[in-house]
Amino acid sequence: QSAEYGPCSLRKMSAMEALELLDQLVDESDPDVDFPNSFHAYQTAEGIRRAHPDKDWFHLVGLLHDLGKVLALFGEPQ
């Protein structure tokens, strides 16, 4: 996996593009959710911001925590 994905040569995208791609994915861990997967990322980041307003790095982690799931769109299992 490291050799295949480490060089980031499959596709380059911004974090925002990856968040948008999440919306094309039906998450096997939560298949009956009626809102886009990116909404979960924003919800998580906002919840962390409210609980920990002084930890901006933590807000970012909440936003990005599921981005690895986009690999399922490139043939990786969920």
Image: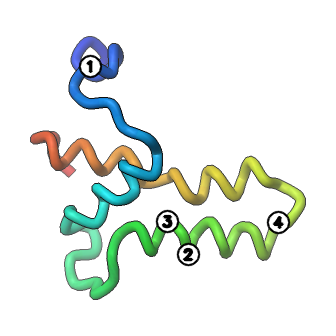
How many badges with numbers are in the image? Answer: 4
Please state which of the two labelled residues, at mark 4 or mark 3, is closer to the viewer. Answer: 3
Residue contact at pointers 3 and 2, CB within 8 angstroms: yes
**Residue at x 21%, y 62% (from the top left corner):** 25
Name the quadrant of the N terminus: top left
Residue pointed to by mark 1: 9
Residue 41: which disc? Answer: 3
Identify the secondary structure beneath mark 1: loop
Badge 4: how crowded within 10 Å, few (<14), some, or many (20+)? Answer: few
Badge 3: how crowded within 10 Å, few (<14), some, or many (20+)? Answer: many
Residue 52: which disc? Answer: 4
Please state which of the two labelled residues, at mark 4 or mark 1, is closer to the viewer. Answer: 1
Badge 2: how crowded within 10 Å, few (<14), some, or many (20+)? Answer: few
Please state which of the two labelled residues, at mark 2 or mark 1, is closer to the viewer. Answer: 1
x, y (%) of residue 47?
67, 75
Q: Earlier in the sequence, mark 4 or mark 1?
A: 1
**Residue at x 59%, y 58% (from the top left corner):** 62
Q: Earlier in the sequence, mark 4 or mark 3?
A: 3
Inspect this view and state whether residue 1 appears.
no
Amino acid type assigned to the residue bearing label 2 in the image: Gln
Q: Earlier in the sequence, mark 2 or mark 4?
A: 2
Amino acid type assigned to the residue bearing label 4 in the image: His
